[in-house]
Each structure stands twice: as C-alpha cells, then as structure tokens.
Amino acid sequence: MDNQDNKNCKEEQCCDKQSCCQEEQVQQQQQCCSNDCCESEEQIKNNVKQRYGEICEQTKQINAATFCGVGGCGSSSGCGTIDYAVFAENYEKLQGYVPEADLGLGCGIPTEFAELKKGDIVLDLGSGAGNDCFIARALVGESGKVIGVDMTPNMIRKAQLNSDKYNFRNVEFRYGDISDLPILDNFVDVVISNCVINLVPDKRKVFLEIKRVLKQNGHFSISDVLTTGDLPFSIRKASELHVGCVSGALRKDIQLKILEELGFTDIQIKKEKVIDFPDELMLKYVSEQELKDFQNSGIKIISATIYAKKQ
C-alpha cells in the first residue's frame, strides 16, 4: 500500500474500526487501521451496552417508533427517527412466543432455519430479553437446553424474570461477551443470533468463538445486517448508526469469505431482504449529494439469515 493509499484509508475508513478492517479481515493488511482515528473496541462496546440497557426499559412499541442516539432520548445526543420495524419480523404466531421478551429488535427469525430438534443444546448470542431463546426452547423440548449470552446486565435480568415468570427450567442466561464466550469447547449443537454480530468490532473473533463452542457437525443460523458494498464514510463514522445496526454491518461478500477462511462448510444465505431507511434519517449523517450518490450506487443494506456447519 503506497503512502497516498494509506492516507486515504486512514482518513476515510478508520472512523469505525470494524468498517476500516473489513478488507483487512480478508487481506490481512494490518497497517490500515490507526487507533488515533478509530473508536476503540471498548468504546464501541460501551456505547452498545449503554444504549441497549436503555432499550431494555422500553416497550416494543417505543422501540418501533424511535431510534435514540447513544446518550438516549432527551440527552445531548438527541433522537433520530429510525423505525426498528424495518428490521423486525413478526414472532407473535410462533410456538414458544413470550410477549414480554419481544422488544422488536431483531432482523430475522434465526430459528426458522436452525433445524432444531428435541434434545439439542442451543446457544443464543446477544440474547436480549430472551425472545429467540424462548422460541428455541419450544423446539428443543424439555430434553433440550437453551443458553443465552448477553453483555448488558439489564437484559440478563429482564430475560431471567421472563423465564421465571413462565417457570422455564431448561433456559439459562449468562452475562458475557460474545467474542469471548463463557461456554465450554465443543458443547452446543446449534448457535443462533439475531441482529447482534454487526454490533461487535471484531466479527472474525466472534465466528472463531462460534466454531470453538460448536460440537463436531454442529451448525449455526444467524440473522444479521449486511451490505452489498461499502457504505459512505459519513454513515460508517456515526456511532448512533452503529448502535442502530447500520454502520457496523459487514459487506456480504466479506462475511462469506470470513466463514470460508475459518473452515465452515455448507454456507448458505437462507433468506435476505433489502432494508429501506427514510431519507430524513440518512440526511442527519450525509449531505443530500452523498445520499443521492449512495442511492444511485446500487449498494443496499440488507438483513440476511446465514447457515453454516462446523465439520
């Protein structure tokens, strides 16, 4: 990489460490990122933890109506107007549905393609208030077990209260970081996750952890936000949009490449849909010309459910 390319990388890509490092994860170009122009991983995680701690205290209806900045509504960060419903799927008719656990924050239904069977041990990454865990519990039955891991203490408490309310005995919630899972090696049959991995700075590390905890021939079904190309600098640098599952999204081709490199097999995109954001939201972070250029570029923000196996 010559000096000019390196300069452009630092100026245009390093605003968000994970966005900057997308190509590094494939090409191993470690010189690209610079800590003095990136939010640290710890900063990103703290922003996410704070925001989702606030979301935990809100209702599904409020979450579907507003997207708040990192500081929350009424703070100096202000509020935007992103509707979480552009991501979310309807869970209400699914077996095992617990209304109190549904905060409307997902971008798919990972259990739809998880091939769960009675007796399976299932791990949910970023389990929130327990929504996907309770759906999985209904599918694996009393002989199975579901473990949810979340790094937000408020979410863990809320999920446990929901579980206790319905007297579920085979669901467990653990506090932890999904890039350093509190789970034994080769322990779970299936890993699920819903609109969480995009929030993590080092996604490769998360998938390494998934591979570590899966049994041989185990598999995952993960719903997440991806892009079909590089998002504009002004979108990627907005921490509010990172917490809102936008600026932290990987390019789809890079996501698939990472999975191949880590040795996963039978990699499939089971479902995807384009997510359309209102212009008024995007104009908070980009100029009218930048928005027009982005819309004309053909680059899309998508939700996708990916399935893969560990051999």
Image: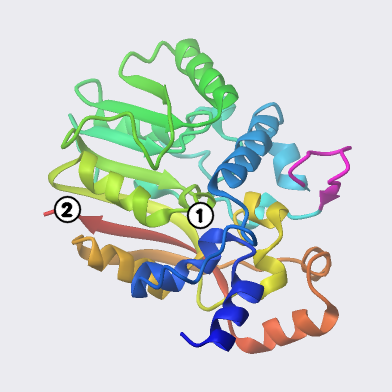
Q: Horizontal and vertical percent for residue 64?
A: 71, 45
Q: Amino acid at mark 2?
A: Lys
Q: Horizontal and vertical percent for residue 190?
A: 25, 42
Q: Which mark, residue 303?
A: none
- Residue 60's quadrant in the figure? top right
Horizontal placement of 294 versus 112: left or right? right
Which quadrant is home to the C terminus? bottom left
Q: Amino acid at mark 1?
A: Asn
Horizontal placement of 289 versus 86: left or right? right
Instruction: Give SS at disc 2.
Output: loop
Residue visible at 54% across and 48% down in the picture = 41
Horizontal placement of 247 versus 188: left or right? right
* Residue 79 magenta: yes
Q: CA distance from mark 2 to mark 1?
A: 21 Å
Instruction: Give SS at disc 1.
Output: helix
In the rendered view, tell whether residue 57 sits above or below residue 231.
above
Q: First in sequence, mark 2 or 1: give its number.
A: 1
Between 210 and 194, the residue placed more toward the observer is 210
- Neighbor class of circle 2 (other Cα within 10 Å; few <14, some 14-19, many 20+) is many
On the image, numbered disc 1 is attached to which residue? 198
Residue visible at 56% across and 34% down in the picture = 102
Residue visible at 25% across and 58% down in the picture = 308
Q: Which mark, residue 310?
A: 2
* Residue 32 magenta: no
